[in-house]
Image (cartoon, helix red, strand yellow):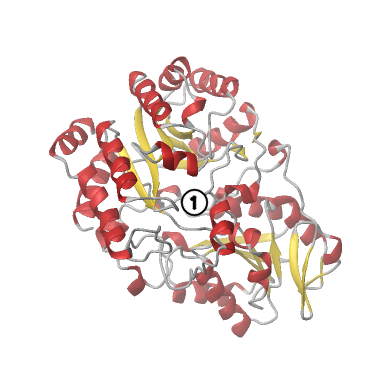
Amino acid sequence: MSKVLLINPPFEQEEESVGRSKSVRKVLNIVPPLGISYVAAILERAGIEVKIIDCAIGISFDGLFKMILSEHPDVIGITSTTPAFVNARKIASFVREKRPDVKILIGGTHVSALPDETMKTGLFDIGVIGEGEITIEHLFNNFKNREFVGLDEIRGICYRNKDEICKNENQGFINDLDSIPLPARHLLPHPKYYQPTPASCRRVPYAVMITSRGCPTQCTFCDRKVFGERYRMRSVPNIFLEIEEVVSKYGVREIRFFDDTFTVNKKRIYDVCDEFERRKLNLTWTCLSKVSNVDGPLLKRMKKAGCWQILYGFESGDDRMLKLLKKGNTVEKNMRAIRLTKEAGLEVRGDFIVGTPGETYESLEKTVQFAIDMKLDYAHFNKFVPLPGTELYRTLTAGGHIFDFSKSTILDHSQIHYTPEGLDNDTFSRFLDNANKRFYLRLSYILKRVFSIRTFCQLKGQINGFFAIKEL
């Protein structure tokens, strides 16, 4: 029987390069790697022995390398985003040196966006592009005597053939999401080892779930287009098959629906709410939504069924910037969604992306003031990173910009990948830290959060969050 080791590499670089305190680390959002959990389920269904190592829970490189040497796998699969690719390379280099007979696969958004650049490193045997479940199944059907054969006939991969890099036809997206087995959570650490950000969780243990794939919006800064625009949904019975599993096996008390936009199909959301009430599971839950997908009756129904918070991608408090980002919404539409959500008794989290092309100090100020004036429950001011696979990355690189992701970190605001014309790095970096302080360290906000605490999980999170913001 073949043995496969799937690895989720550390997101950050070496400890000394992160430039962040332990207080900040206590509020990072560390969620289970569902992508490789689905791949693991496909492999188990095919009778292949699989193990997952999730470095996100604090496994060091030394610890990871010892585990690799002790496992003796035939194949190692590494999932990687662009920020984590430097660590994926480090892992692959170690395997190449210590276990040259092991085949190394890489999947995820980075290789999907930059297949040629990924394979030019010479560290990976095969890259899996886009959704990996069908491709992985076909690959291992062609794994004979510790070798992958017939690669030219397998869609959705890139690979090296001597000195040539080959990229096959795309696999296409999976239409019937119910046909995919549930993620192999039994191969992951227990949910108690994962860390929700204080803004996103009231009760633990909690579980992250994805009930749909694809995002029909055209945002210029987002790399989700790598995995398709056409929206595909799991059925309600299939969703609750997974919910019942996480409740019965792991004692989960809260669900975070991690779909790019959970509320695209309103009828399905009403059906989900009906099923929550019918089953009487005593679960709370949160989700992500686009502002144009919600209305008053839907939000009230979600609240009644256990939802307590919605995360919206507002992105900016300036209409000019929203148009440049191709968000398809306006400041007025954002305000309407906030009003309706609050009227339904739900908390509002807001995501903002700052520092994209066209940004000015005036638009930055409008964004922070929007979050304050609208009395959001939580606001996240994220620096713009020109991720491969996005429209902005293509535009900027075509204009001569070169981005080096090997020496910087997403979390450290002192490390800026791109600064808009008219701004400077130091001032922009200070703005990012000060934006969070201005929003979170207001006396009125602190008192509001204190009186909103309902659980010990919230109390612990609010304390950690307060000290993290203070140390920025």
The amino acid type, in three-letter code, at marker 1 is Pro
Does residue 236 appear anywhere in the picture?
Answer: yes
> Going by the picture, which residue comes out furthest to the top?
297
Tell me the crowding category of disc 1: few under 14, some 14 to 19, or many 20 or more residues within 10 angstroms, Cα based.
many
Between residue 11 and residue 39, name the one nearer to us: 11
Could you say where residue 136 lies in the image, as x and y percent from the top left? Answer: 73, 57
Residue where numbered disc 1 is placed? 32
For residue 417, above or below residue 317: below
Q: Looking at the figure, which quarter contains the C terminus?
A: bottom left
- Which residue is rendered at x = 60% and y = 84% of the image? 98
Q: Would residue 260 appear left or right of 313 to someone viewing this image?
A: right
Between residue 418 and residue 183, name the one nearer to us: 418
Could you say where residue 368 lies in the image, as x and y percent from the top left? Answer: 29, 42
- Which residue is rendered at x = 43% and y = 64% of the image? 417
Q: Would residue 416 appear left or right of 159 to someone viewing this image?
A: left
- Which residue is rendered at x = 69% and y = 38% of the image? 177
For residue 456, above or below residue 94: above
- Which residue is rendered at x = 52% and y = 54% of the image? 188
Q: Looking at the figure, which quarter contains the N terminus?
A: bottom right
Could you say where residue 367 lies in the image, as x and y percent from the top left? Answer: 32, 41
Could you say where residue 433 lies in the image, as x and y percent from the top left? Answer: 26, 55
